[in-house]
Image (spheres, helix red, strand yellow):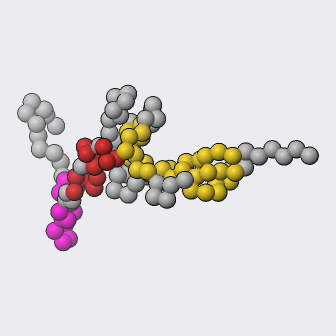
Amino acid sequence: MFFFFVCGEHTFRKNVDGYEGIVCQCYNCGNMAGHVIKSHPWFTFCWIPVLPLSMKGHVDVVCNICSFAQPLENRPDVMGMANRGGQQPPPPPHGQAPQGWGQQPPPQPGFRY
């Protein structure tokens, strides 16, 4: 009797809170395709995740084009972009729409409406 078992590794990935929508330059290929991703590698047996290979996971800047991954700790430029650089816009006064809503832009020189 012959049994065939398949073992391997599968990595689960998800976006990191506070870094959603941030796109940065890849240091390997130079394209603007780097995103912050948290990876959790698992050992699989017959395509079923059985054992986590890392308890915390890895937070990396991963390029969507060349698949180059670099630890987030080595990218201070990306860490500074989290949560809009730590700055939040002030809330509008009570009962008013945010600035710029329902207003026309000021006329530009040499341009007629």
Camera sees residue 81:
no
Q: Residue at x 77, y 46 (%)?
A: 5
Q: Residue at x 19, y 57 (%)?
A: 87
Camera sees residue 92:
yes
**Left or right position of 5 against 110:** right
Say if 91 sits above or below 100 in the image: below
| Furthest-right residue in this view | 1
| Furthest-front residue in this view | 1
Q: Residue at x 49, y 59 (%)?
A: 55
Quarter of the figure with the C terminus: top left
User: In the depicted view, which residue is nearer to us: 50 or 113?
Assistant: 50
| Furthest-top residue in this view | 29
User: In the depicted view, which residue is nearer to us: 55 or 68?
Assistant: 55
Image x and y of residue 67, in percent: 46, 35
Image x and y of residue 61, in percent: 38, 43
Which secondary structure type mostly characterizes the magenta part of the structure? loop
**Left or right position of 54 against 46:** left
| Furthest-left residue in this view | 109
Say if 93 sits above or below 72 in the image: below
Q: Is residue 97 magenta?
A: yes
Magenta residue span: 90-102
Q: Residue at x 72, y 49 (%)?
A: 46
Which quadrant of the view contains residue 95? bottom left
